[in-house]
């Protein structure tokens, strides 16, 4: 709601998470939770008086069975019905549960990464959780975030955390020297292998206005490792496309993501935050050139593995830095041909995946950016490679900008190999970060404007059931009294013209009587009426006309979850 600042939660022991929250907007009030059930408040929660019964933090729920069987699901739904009082008082919460480059190392992020092809499956599983009604997944090299609408935020967040610790489908690219000109692309199931207790040390949880502000900042590039980078906006757009196809984006998540896209566009067009901003790919190129001897950086032999968006940008920035020749290893030649057609200033040589190790032996710097969920390079592969050229110090550079990583951590132990991943790019981006931080302050006013617009829209939804119920109540009375009137007139005296006139008269009277009450139930931020006043009007009308909208809303929630569990 616009009247509240929301709730921000970080888990105890997460030093990086605490730093992230300190870096975030001052309107957020963190609450540190050690074992998700023992709150220790690290600041005052600013909650509007009317919201206190809705937002009382209740962490006294007992731990229930984690069984995934159908009987357990049915039992949870029965418990949901039993807790009717609580759910009638509690408004569904928007929440984001996730980790990012600011809160977790790449070793943790790669275990939880969900490939885009698996987003619909993940959304479906999340929406099948007992307390989750809408869901979206944003998984990139720098973050893994799950956005949900939870019918009750405490058990809903716990369900999402349990889901994160369990299975996700992955795609593996398996390179086999014994299979000539072939690479195996294998779908299988993995378990993240991260206990929930360990996850809590790196996760951040934000609710309602804090969750919305976070997404808007992400879309605007304010939360990126490379402040102001533009690729994240395209990734947020892709979440909407995938979510709409899987029908997991309900009206709340869908509207929030679309407003986030609007905020991201406005920030880039109305501020200078993107001017001179680097991307992850350009930062990777800068890092590689920093590590090479300056006198030989232009002559170093470059290899790019993967010709997707990130790989293409690496090639583009190499060309901008004066590189004249690059070898590209990719699954198909078509994408490399398209890049070659677009970039005329650099010689691009294609090699299939079956020649990856051969191409690596002839390279001084290797950039990796594929979608493989398993490493392409292990210690034994790199040990078998000859040293890099003496001009670059005989040490081969691996710059891995993939998450999960394409270069195994074990490669760091090879004598003539130096391995860098996305977390190492901080060394590059810190150089011009202060200037962009000043520009980011300008962007916050735009974020706040868009946040207020979204919150006003969401606030207006709260009175919609009362408006519908009141209209339906009035129409029922009108229809009943109209029928009595027509019977008294009698069929002999009742002409078609007279029937129409009486019907229009009754409709006109009802509409004019309802106009005033309905106007006082609308809350879209276009007038001076406060949200508290609007909600007081809503509760008064519910009492006067016995509309019982809260019970109806609860029944709708339970019915939707029961139908999902039975489908």
Image: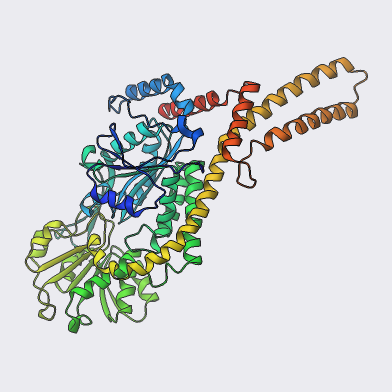
Q: Where is 122 relative to 79, above or below?
A: below
Q: Nearer the viewer, residue 175 or 238?
A: 238
Q: Nearer the viewer, residue 203 or 32?
A: 32
Res 490 seen here: no
> Which residue is farthest bottom?
295
Q: In the drawing, does residue 206 fall left or right of residue 102?
A: right
Image quadrant holding the C terminus, namely top left
How many numbered discs?
0
* Residue 234, image quadrant: bottom left
> Which residue is farthest front?
44
Residue 238 position within the rendered picture, expressed as x and y whole percent measured from the top left:
43, 54
Residue 248 position within the rendered picture, expressed as x and y whole percent measured from the top left:
44, 41
Q: In the drawing, does residue 63 fall left or right of residue 179?
A: right
> Which residue is at 49% across, 53% downward?
448
Q: How is the image coloured?
A: rainbow
> Which residue is at 9% across, 75% downward?
394
Q: Where is 317 relative to 464, above or below?
A: below
Residue 324 position within the rendered picture, expressed as x and y whole percent measured from the top left:
28, 82
Q: Nearer the viewer, residue 242 or 154?
A: 154
Res 421 seen here: yes
Q: Where is 187 relative to 401, above or below?
A: above
Residue 43 position within the rendered picture, expressed as x and y whole percent measured from the top left:
35, 42
> Which residue is at 14% across, 67% downward?
418
């Amino acid at each position: 709601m616009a009247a509240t600042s929301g709730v921000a939660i970080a888990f105890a022991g997460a030093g990086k998470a605490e730093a992230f929250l300190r870096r975030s907007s001052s309107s957020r009030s963190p609450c540190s939770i050690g074992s998700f059930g023992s709150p220790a408040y690290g600041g005052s929660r600013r909650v509007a008086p009317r919201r206190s019964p809705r937002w009382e933090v209740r962490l006294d729920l007992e731990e229930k069975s984690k069984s995934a069987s159908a009987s357990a699901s049915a039992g949870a739904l029965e418990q949901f019905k039993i807790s009717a009082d609580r759910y009638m008082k509690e408004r569904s919460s928007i929440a984001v549960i996730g980790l990012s480059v600011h809160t977790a190392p790449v070793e943790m992020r790669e275990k939880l990464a969900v490939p885009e092809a698996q987003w619909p499956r993940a959304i479906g599983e999340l929406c099948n959780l007992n307390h989750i009604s809408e869901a979206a997944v944003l998984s990139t090299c720098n973050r893994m975030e799950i956005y949900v609408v939870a019918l009750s935020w405490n058990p809903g967040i716990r369900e999402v955390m349990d889901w994160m610790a369990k299975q996700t489908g992955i795609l593996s690219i398996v390179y086999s020297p014994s299979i000539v000109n072939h690479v195996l692309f294998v779908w299988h199931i993995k378990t993240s292998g991260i206990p929930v207790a360990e996850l809590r040390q790196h996760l951040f949880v934000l609710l309602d206005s804090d969750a919305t502000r976070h997404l808007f900042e992400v879309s605007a590039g304010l939360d990126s490792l490379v402040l102001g980078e533009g690729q994240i906006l395209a990734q947020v757009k892709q979440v909407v496309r995938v979510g709409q196809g899987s029908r997991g984006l309900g009206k709340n998540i869908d509207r929030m993501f679309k407003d986030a896209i609007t905020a991201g566009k406005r920030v880039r067009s109305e501020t200078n935050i993107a001017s001179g901003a680097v991307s992850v790919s350009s930062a990777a190129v800068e890092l590689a050139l920093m590590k090479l001897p300056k006198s030989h950086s232009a002559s170093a032999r470059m290899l790019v593995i993967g010709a997707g968006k990130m790989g293409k940008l690496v090639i583009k920035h190499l060309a901008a830095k004066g590189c004249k020749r690059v070898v590209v290893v990719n699954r198909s030649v078509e994408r490399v041909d398209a890049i070659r057609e677009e970039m005329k200033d650099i010689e691009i040589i294609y090699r299939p995946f079956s020649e990856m190790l051969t191409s690596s032996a002839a390279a001084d710097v290797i950039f990796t950016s594929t979608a493989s969920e398993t490493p392409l390079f292990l210690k034994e592969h790199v040990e078998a490679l000859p040293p890099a050229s003496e001009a670059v110090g005989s040490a081969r550079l691996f710059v891995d900008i993939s998450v999960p990583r394409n270069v195994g951590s074990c490669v760091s132990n090879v004598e003539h190999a130096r391995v860098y991943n996305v977390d190492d790019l901080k060394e590059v981006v810190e150089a011009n970060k202060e200037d962009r931080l000043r520009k980011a302050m300008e962007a916050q006013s735009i974020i706040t404007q868009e946040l207020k617009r979204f919150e006003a829209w969401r606030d207006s939804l709260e009175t919609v059931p009362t408006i519908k119920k009141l209209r339906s109540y009035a129409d029922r009375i009108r229809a009943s009294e109209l029928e009595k009137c027509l019977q008294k007139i009698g069929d002999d005296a009742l002409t078609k013209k007279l029937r129409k006139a009486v019907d229009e008269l009754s409709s006109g009277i009802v509409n004019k009587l309802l106009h005033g009450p309905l106007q006082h139930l609308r809350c879209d931020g276009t007038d001076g009426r406060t949200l508290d006043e609007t909600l007081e009007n809503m509760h008064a009308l519910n009492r006067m006309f016995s509309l019982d909208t809260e019970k109806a809303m609860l029944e709708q929630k339970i019915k939707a979850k029961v139908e999902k569990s039975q489908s």
